[in-house]
Image (cartoon, rainbow, N blue to C red):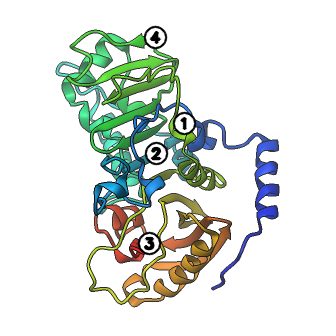
């Protein structure tokens, strides 16, 4: 095992080479950073978590810490690229079945789709660890059926998606559909849009949001999420290599005091990118810091902590620092909990920073 330090010059050259080749644009080369330019930032005017050093689970000790008494605004972003999964598996994503009463959908078609769902999304029978868009959870069979009948669109057929949340209640999904449905603008029919949501199309992109009433989500004006330098730093690091699932969340402070692991230095955002390389499942863990010194310290801590027997299903491969950005690459078993769930649902101390 080794720890590698990447120079800023080498990183700049690599970024230039990627840009020159025109890779990571669409399809299997879908870029998270490009999508963030399409999402209005609902935190405009609020004190963002990265600017105060807080996280989605922390609150300021007093009003002076949060700037005029505003709450810290936690952010969570998730994205999946099903075209990349098709490239990895060698099999196209099967079309979503029509489950409406009276449809002539074959049982074979239903089973093929369900088998695919189980194989690529986190779970006991999964070969990969993608997560489904929350849009799928919000759209129950009533909405799905109406979309199929009225628009000829099945939301489950999305090729890629990005889910964005900003505390406390703003959420937005951008989903790329296989074809342009020929529907422009916001849907007005109450039978097609769940209560509280604004949903529409911009070409092949389905845009659905809640809590963005003061923003034009089809053609953003003003600040976008891409204007947050730390979030974009994480997204650019994610996009530096292929991924089939990616995520970014505001930094996670350590909870409790029962762990013997070396606590991490404070960082502002945690990113992850999942992919498969030479038949092995690879996770890249990205930490964005305020100072390069913290990135260097966390590179050493991660390698040390992963030697703990509790993480015997995670193999450390390397840790690269580029200024404030740390990227840790590991190989992990897909039949165990995904590292993303470890960070955001289990609050595993492996990802927790010390309040300092």
Label disc, if present, on residue 184 of the rendered structure = 4
Work out how far the residue at label 4 is from the one at label 3, CA to CA, in angstroms.
Answer: 43 Å
For marks 2 and 4, the one nearer the N-term is: 2
Residue drawn at 47 percent across, 31 percent down: 40
Q: Is residue 335 above or below residue 192?
A: below
Mark nearer the viewer, 3 or 2: 2
**Residue 91 picture location, percent across and down:** 52, 45
Q: Which residue is mark 3?
A: 333
Q: Is residue 309 above or below residue 167?
A: below
Say few, some or many: other residues with alpha carbon within 10 Å of mark 3 (under 14 / 14 to 19 / 20 or more).
some
Q: Is residue 9 above or below residue 32?
A: below
Please tell me whether mark 4 sits on a helix, a strand or a loop: loop
Label disc, if present, on residue 79 of the rendered structure = 2
For marks 4 and 3, the one nearer the N-term is: 4
Work out how far the residue at label 2 is from the one at label 1, CA to CA, in angstroms.
Answer: 10 Å
Query: Are the residues flagged by discs 2 and 1 in contact, CB closer than 8 Å?
Result: yes
For marks 3 and 2, the one nearer the N-term is: 2
Please tell me whether mark 3 sits on a helix, a strand or a loop: loop
* Quadrant into which the N terminus falls: bottom right
Q: Which residue is mark 1?
A: 35
Work out how far the residue at label 3 is from the one at label 1, CA to CA, in angstroms.
Answer: 29 Å
């Amino acid at each position: 095992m080794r720890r590698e330090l990447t120079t800023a010059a080498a990183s700049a050259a690599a970024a230039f080479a990627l840009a020159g080749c025109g890779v990571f644009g669409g399809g299997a080369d879908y870029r998270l950073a490009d999508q963030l330019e399409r999402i209005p930032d609902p935190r405009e005017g609020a004190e963002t978590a990265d600017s105060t050093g807080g996280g989605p689970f922390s609150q300021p000790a007093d009003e002076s810490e949060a700037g005029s008494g505003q709450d810290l605004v936690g952010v969570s972003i998730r994205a999946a690229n099903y075209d990349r999964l098709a490239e990895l598996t060698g099999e196209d994503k099967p079309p979503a079945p029509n489950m409406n009463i009276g449809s002539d959908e074959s049982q074979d078609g239903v089973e093929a789709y369900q088998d695919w769902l189980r194989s690529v999304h986190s779970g006991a029978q999964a070969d990969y660890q993608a997560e489904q868009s929350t849009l799928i959870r919000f759209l129950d069979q009533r909405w799905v059926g109406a979309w199929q009948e009225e628009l000829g669109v099945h939301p489950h057929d999305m090729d890629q998606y990005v889910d964005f949340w900003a505390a406390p209640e703003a959420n937005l999904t951008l989903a790329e559909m296989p074809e342009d449905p020929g529907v422009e603008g916001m849907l007005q029919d109450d039978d097609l849009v769940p209560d509280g949501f604004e949903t529409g199309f911009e070409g092949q992109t389905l845009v659905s949001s809640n809590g963005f009433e003061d923003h034009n989500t089809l053609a953003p004006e003003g600040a976008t999420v891409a204007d947050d330098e730390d979030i974009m730093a994480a997204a650019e690091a994610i996009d530096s290599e292929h991924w089939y699932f990616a995520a970014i969340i505001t930094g996670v402070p350590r909870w409790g005091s029962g762990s013997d692991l070396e606590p991490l230095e404070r960082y502002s955002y945690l990113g992850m990118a999942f992919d498969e390389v030479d038949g092995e499942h690879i996770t890249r863990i990205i930490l964005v810091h305020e100072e390069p010194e913290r990135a260097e310290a966390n590179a050493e801590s991660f390698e040390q902590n992963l030697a703990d027997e509790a993480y015997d299903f995670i193999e450390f491969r390397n840790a690269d620092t580029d200024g404030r950005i740390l990227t840790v690459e590991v190989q992990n078993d897909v039949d165990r909990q995904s590292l993303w769930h470890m960070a955001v649902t289990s609050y595993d101390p492996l990802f927790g920073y010390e309040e300092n």
